[in-house]
Image (cartoon, rainbow, N blue to C red):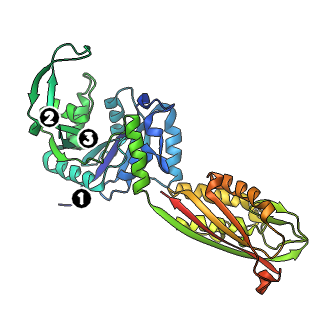
Amino acid sequence: MPRPRVSALIAAGGQGLRLGAPEPKQFLVLGAQTILEHSIERLLVHPGVDEVVVAVPADRVHGVAARCRERGWHRVTCVEGGARRQDSVAAAFAAAKTDAEVVVIHDAARPFVLASLIEATIEAAMTHGAAIAAVPVRDTVKQAGGDRTAPSRPVAGTLPREDIFLAQTPQAFRREVLARALASGHGPDVTDEAMLVEAQGQAVFLVPGEATNVKITTQDDLEWARHHVARTGTMRVGTGYDLHRLVEGRPLILGGVHIPFDRGLDGHSDADIVCHAVTDAVLGAAAAGDIGRLFPDTDPQWTGADSVRLLEAAVVHLHQCGFHVSNVDVTVIAQRPKLLPYLEAMRGRLASALQVPIASVSIKGKTNEQVDSMGRGESMACHAVAMVVS
Ligand code: MG
């Protein structure tokens, strides 16, 4: 069977303030990006998905679209969502390509959906017309009777748990099935699209969901999600090295700090070997190029450049690649002057450029025992390692 054309819709129009945070839950940060960005990325990188349409609150459309452009996510479209979930889905559906065969709908607050589950729902939608991810209940299911507002309610009966499933997303539909359901969807609020489709008399099939495909709803969910990201996020390391000659008539700048000395490092920019080595370590960890490629010394805009600014720009680039800095460790090789009095100031400058706490930055000074060019005071060099996490 040839691969169907697939549009994925993400309903992120909700104000979801239940977590008590100042903004809707889909915009809270989880690791290196927002919960919404995790969800978009899961669908976008799936080989079976051709486009992603995201419905967000009106005041977020511009910001989310700009962020997607920044990250090179050109197959993502942002539209304004509606008051109810089905209004947001309808808005996203209206902006999606009309030649798709299958439409996948996913919750913004389910950032851990696996590619295999996206695949399974698309396949089931092709076969049956409508399919949703769902997990069986493990506990015995009691139906409550009596008054819904009462503090304690009597059990009205026990439901056969073999027949009870908890709906997740993705929910996937042949495009015409969803189009019919949405066109009829001016009834009461629904909590998922399958309800609209069921109301049309169309059979919706269950696909085995995943326990880790949680919907982040409560503070406990958010904490679990943050631990999950920390456990499963990728850690990567990079190294950086730089050496410049010492000459008269130049200021000595290391780690963005001006150090009184009778000579300074020679170079096109301010020749700050510490910033240069750290920049290369950070970029190297993300396999995102190096300082020479990002800021070529043939480009006059970097003449005499403040290398702290270059490091800051490299960190922005790193964030765009989906990583942030965990820590850096730096060794500066200088026969003279003594660097100890300046190390704390250098840590502070680097920490602020790297957007990490000072405790995540280490700098040591070394002499080279009067051996070779560094030891004879003809040059200074710097080694750096950086760890980044996704
Ligand atoms: Mg350099």
Q: CA distance from mark 3 to mark 2?
A: 20 Å
Amino acid marked by disc 1: Arg
Foreground: 132 or 216? 216
According to the image, label 2 marks what residue? 140
Residue drawn at the location 22% of the way across and 38% of the way down: 167
| Secondary element type, mark 3 | strand
Amino acid marked by disc 3: Gln
Residue drawn at the location 28% of the way across and 24% of the way down: 189
Q: CA distance from mark 1 to mark 3?
A: 24 Å
Q: Residues within 10 Å of mark 3 (few under 14, many from 20)?
A: many
According to the image, label 1 marks what residue? 3
Q: Looking at the image, is mark 3 or mark 2 earlier in the sequence? A: 2
Foreground: 204 or 150? 150
Can you tell me which quadrant of the image ligand 1 is in? bottom right
According to the image, label 3 marks what residue? 168
Which of discs 1 and 3 lies nearer the camera? The answer is 3
Q: Looking at the image, is mark 2 or mark 1 earlier in the sequence? A: 1
Which quarter shows the N terminus? bottom left
